[in-house]
């Protein structure tokens, strides 16, 4: 009898933990960051990465106002994502009428209904594959490193730009380039790690996501919005980010 009660207790605790992990994976947090740069007027960026097979919560987006640009930091899709779901997510990211930019992640090539990059272009999203573009009216540039659809390289920048932002899906890729490369950027945005996604006793395959203020360069590693492999999270949080560029 005691043995049966013991097993029942383990089963109930395990069931409770799985439900908790599932609910956590379906929640979200809006993280707000600020970065002082050489800009005349404030500029707000909505950053989201690692959406994978998740449908973005439109109620969360409805609470956010005045977005100047949307940046998707990779893994917008994977083999599980249908064309219908991807179209819904893009439409939801068009909530603010702001331009949307996409930098590829390691799972995006798995999207099968049609070539992802051409699909995004035809639906109003600008992919950046080892190239840069101006965003905003105050000399802000956005660069994207893409080692998945092409060979990774750092987009060339001139010294005339006031504010430079770099996005690369996997933060480890930055180690392939000389350290001084990062000094060209005021802000670096990354994802991929999911903060470890499932952490036991505080330990996981990756470190937790973070925001770091630097003397010249601020750095963000997002824990991402969706999940890979299993729709569960423990000790990590699904998150999106509002990054406010503020005049010095």
Image (cartoon, helix red, strand yellow):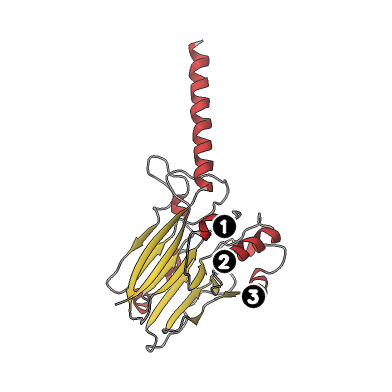
Q: Name the foreground residue: 21 vs 33.
A: 33
Tag 1 secondary structure: helix
Dot 1 and dot 2 residues touching (CB under 8 Å): yes
Residue 24 higher or lower than 240, as above or below: above
Please report whichever mark, 3 or 1, sits nearer to the chain's N-terminal start. 1
Q: Nearer the viewer, mark 3 or mark 1?
A: 1
Residue at the left extreme? 215
Residue picked out by circle 3: 121
Circle nearer the N terminus (1, 2): 1
Q: Which residue is mark 1?
A: 58
Secondary element at tag 2: loop
Image height check: is 22 above or below 174? Answer: above
Question: Viewed as shown, does residue 39 lie left or right of 66?
Answer: left
Q: CA distance from mark 2 to mark 3?
A: 18 Å
Q: What secondary structure is found at the residue carrying circle 3?
A: helix
Q: Nearer the viewer, residue 166 or 245?
A: 245
Q: Residue at x 58, y 49 (%)?
A: 229
Q: Residue furthest right?
A: 113
- Residue 166 location (% of width, % of height): 44, 74
Q: CA distance from mark 3 to mark 1?
A: 22 Å
Is there CB contact under 8 Å for labels 3 and 1?
no
Q: Residue 175, can we see it?
A: no
View extreme (top): residue: 1
User: Which residue in the structure is indicated by mark 2?
Assistant: 95
Q: Classify mark 3: residues with Cα within 10 Å, few (<14), some (14-19) or many (20+).
A: few
Establish if 16 lies above or below 65: above
Q: Look at 54% across and 55% down and name the residue there.
A: 59
């Amino acid at each position: 009898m005691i043995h049966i009660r013991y097993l029942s207790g383990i089963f109930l605790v395990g069931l409770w933990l799985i439900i908790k992990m599932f609910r956590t994976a379906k929640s979200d947090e809006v993280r707000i960051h600020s970065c002082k740069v050489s800009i005349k007027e404030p500029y707000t960026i909505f950053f989201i990465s690692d959406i994978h097979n998740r449908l973005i919560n439109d109620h969360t987006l409805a609470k956010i106002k005045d977005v100047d640009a949307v940046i998707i930091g990779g893994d917008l899709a994977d083999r599980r994502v249908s064309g219908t779901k991807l179209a819904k997510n893009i439409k939801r990211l068009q909530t603010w009428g702001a331009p949307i930019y996409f930098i590829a992640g390691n799972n995006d090539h798995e999207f099968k209904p049609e070539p992802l990059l051409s699909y995004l272009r035809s639906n109003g999203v600008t992919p950046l594959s080892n190239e840069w573009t101006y965003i905003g009216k105050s000399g802000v540039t956005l660069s994207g490193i893409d080692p998945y659809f092409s060979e990774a390289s750092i987009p060339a920048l001139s010294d005339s730009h006031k504010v430079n932002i770099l996005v690369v899906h996997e933060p480890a890729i930055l180690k392939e380039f000389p350290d001084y490369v990062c000094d060209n950027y005021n802000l670096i945005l990354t994802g991929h790690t999911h903060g470890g996604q499932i952490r036991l006793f505080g330990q996981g395959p990756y470190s937790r996501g973070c925001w770091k203020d630097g003397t010249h360069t601020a750095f963000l590693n997002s824990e991402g919005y969706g999940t890979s492999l299993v729709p569960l999270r423990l000790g990590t949080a699904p998150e999106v980010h509002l990054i406010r560029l503020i005049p010095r």
